[in-house]
């Protein structure tokens, strides 16, 4: 790779920076709070039960509706959890909805664009009890998808602690069931909050990178030939990002 050629350096930097800049744009950020007004995590929208014993907590963001569709028992706020270093979600994890002990906790997510790739992350954690309990989730689009062991009081190494994450595409709706293995104490499952982000498709990123390179190539009116080692396309290939279009008037 010829880093003395500014075009090549820009090519590499552009390819590296586009994913970082576009990846994981958040479209849904919801914090399950208590109706009494427990604190909301920065950047999130609070959701609460409409009334005790009612399973209709729902909100729509960016055209996507998240509905707590069944099994809801009530809510809890376990008190302050200090943010610390890479962990900044204390206000998200301290409060949660919990499922009925005789039923599974269910949630539906609808309004997804089948052409998008979504990363769905759900937090399931009780900061002060149920130590040793495993929460698991089952989504309707494939097999059992994951589990997380509850540990009283954390630790919280980062914002991904005590969460399930999965990626979906090609669908408009997904239904979740969260369960609890009942190993100790209550068998009520927990729901602290949810985040849904859009993951850029690799193909789109490549096109964006090539588009940016083509633009730079025209602006610089350079005849420089970029050498990208064994991965370089043929120099006369029409998609070669490092060559200005010969049909263009300088
Ligand atoms: Ca909260
Ligand atoms: Ca915070
Ligand atoms: Ca919460």
Image: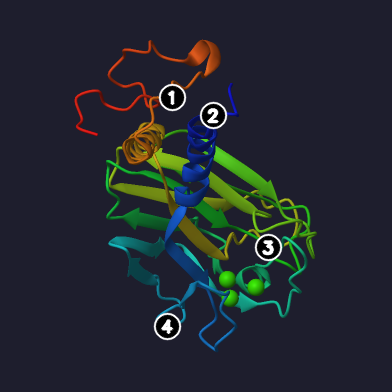
Q: Nearer the viewer, residue 247 or 52?
A: 247
Residue beneath disc 1:
224
Distance in Å between CA atoms under marks 1 and 3: 68 Å
The image position of residue 119, as x and y in percent, is 46, 47
Dot 2 alpha-carbon crowd within 10 angstroms: few under 14, some 14 to 19, many 20 or more? few
Callout 2 touching callout 1 (CB < 8 Å): yes
The residue drawn where x is 72% and y is 60% is 86
Sequence order check, earlier mark of 4 and 3 = 4
SS for dot 3 = loop
Image quarter in which the C terminus is found: top left
SS for dot 1 = loop
Which-is-in-front pick, marks 1 and 4? 1
Distance in Å between CA atoms under marks 2 and 1: 8 Å
Q: Quadrant of residue 210?
A: top left
Residue beneath disc 2:
5
Callout 2 touching callout 3 (CB < 8 Å): no
Distance in Å between CA atoms under marks 1 and 4: 68 Å
Residue beneath disc 4:
51
124 vs 14: above or below: below
Q: Which mark is residue 186?
A: 3
Q: Is residue 73 left or right of residue 134?
A: left
Q: Quadrant of residue 94?
A: bottom right
Sequence order check, earlier mark of 2 and 1 = 2
Q: Is residue 86 left or right of residue 171?
A: right
The residue drawn where x is 79% and y is 62% is 152
Dot 3 alpha-carbon crowd within 10 angstroms: few under 14, some 14 to 19, many 20 or more? some
Q: Which mark is residue 248?
A: none
């Amino acid at each position: 790779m010829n880093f003395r050629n500014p075009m090549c350096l820009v090519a590499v930097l552009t390819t590296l920076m586009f994913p970082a800049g576009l990846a994981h744009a958040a479209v849904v950020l919801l914090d399950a709070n208590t109706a009494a007004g427990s604190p909301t995590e920065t950047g999130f929208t609070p959701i609460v039960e409409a009334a005790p014993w009612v399973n209709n907590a729902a909100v729509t963001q960016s055209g996507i509706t998240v509905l707590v569709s069944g099994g809801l028992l009530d809510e809890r706020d376990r008190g302050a959890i200090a943010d610390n270093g890479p962990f900044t979600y204390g206000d998200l994890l301290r409060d949660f909805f919990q499922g009925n002990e005789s039923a599974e906790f269910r949630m539906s997510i609808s309004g997804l664009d089948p052409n998008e790739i979504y990363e769905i992350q759900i937090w399931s954690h009780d900061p002060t009890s149920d130590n040793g309990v495993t929460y698991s989730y089952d989504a309707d689009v494939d097999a059992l998808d994951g589990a997380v062991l509850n540990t009283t009081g954390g630790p919280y190494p980062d914002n991904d602690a005590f969460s399930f994450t999965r990626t979906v595409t090609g669908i408009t709706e997904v239904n979740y069931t969260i369960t609890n293995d009942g190993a100790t104490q209550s068998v009520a499952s927990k729901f602290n909050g949810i985040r849904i982000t859009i993951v850029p498709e690799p193909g789109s990123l490549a096109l964006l990178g090539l588009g940016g390179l083509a633009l730079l190539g025209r602006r610089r009116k350079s005849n420089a030939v970029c050498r990208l080692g064994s991965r370089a396309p043929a120099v006369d290939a029409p998609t070669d990002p490092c060559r200005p279009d010969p049909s263009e008037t300088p």
